[in-house]
Structure formats: C-alpha cells, structure tokens
C-alpha cells in the first residue's frame, strides 16, 4: 500500500523533471529587436468586401 504511494510520487517527480528539462531546451529567446507599432495595424475590417456572402447557391 505504502510502496504504491511512494512509487506514484516518484513517477510524478520523474515526469516533472523530464518536462522541466525539455522546457529549458525549447527556450527560443529573443530573435530580433523589432517591435510592432500598436497604432499601425493593418487589420481587415469585418464589413470589408471579402467577407460578403458570395452570390449563387452555397
């Protein structure tokens, strides 16, 4: 009974250790100094003509 509890704690710790090492290996860091200007977004408006329903049978 107690051995099963210790085993499950050991497995959880082992999984946590493996995942924590993988997170460090996947760290991308900063690739450039570019920061997009907040006011100059080129978003498409929802009432744009590309979002209109096409004519004919759909």
Image (tube, grey):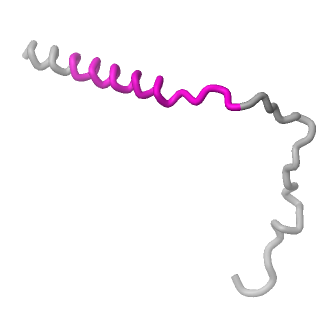
Q: State which region is magenta.
A: 9-31
Q: Quadrant of the C terminus?
A: bottom right
Depth order, front residue of 25/54: 25
Depth order, front residue of 26/9: 26
On the rendered structure, is 7 left or right of 36? left
Q: Residue furthest right?
A: 39
Q: Is residue 28 magenta?
A: yes
Residue sitting at x 22%, y 22%: 11
Question: Residue 19 appears at what percent x and percent y?
Answer: 38, 26
Name the quadrant containing residue 57: bottom right
On the rendered structure, is 58 left or right of 7? right
Q: Quadrant of the N terminus?
A: top left
Question: Residue 38 appears at what percent x and percent y?
Answer: 87, 34
Main secondary-structure element of the magenta-colored stretch: helix
The correct choice, above or below, for 45 with respect to 29 in the image is below
Question: Residue 22 appears at what percent x and percent y?
Answer: 41, 28
């Amino acid at each position: 009974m107690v051995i099963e509890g210790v085993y499950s704690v050991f497995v959880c710790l082992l999984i946590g250790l493996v995942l924590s090492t993988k997170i460090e290996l996947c760290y991308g860091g900063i690739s450039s100094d570019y920061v997009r200007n907040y006011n100059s977004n080129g978003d498409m408006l929802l009432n744009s003509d590309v979002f209109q329903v096409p004519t004919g049978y759909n």
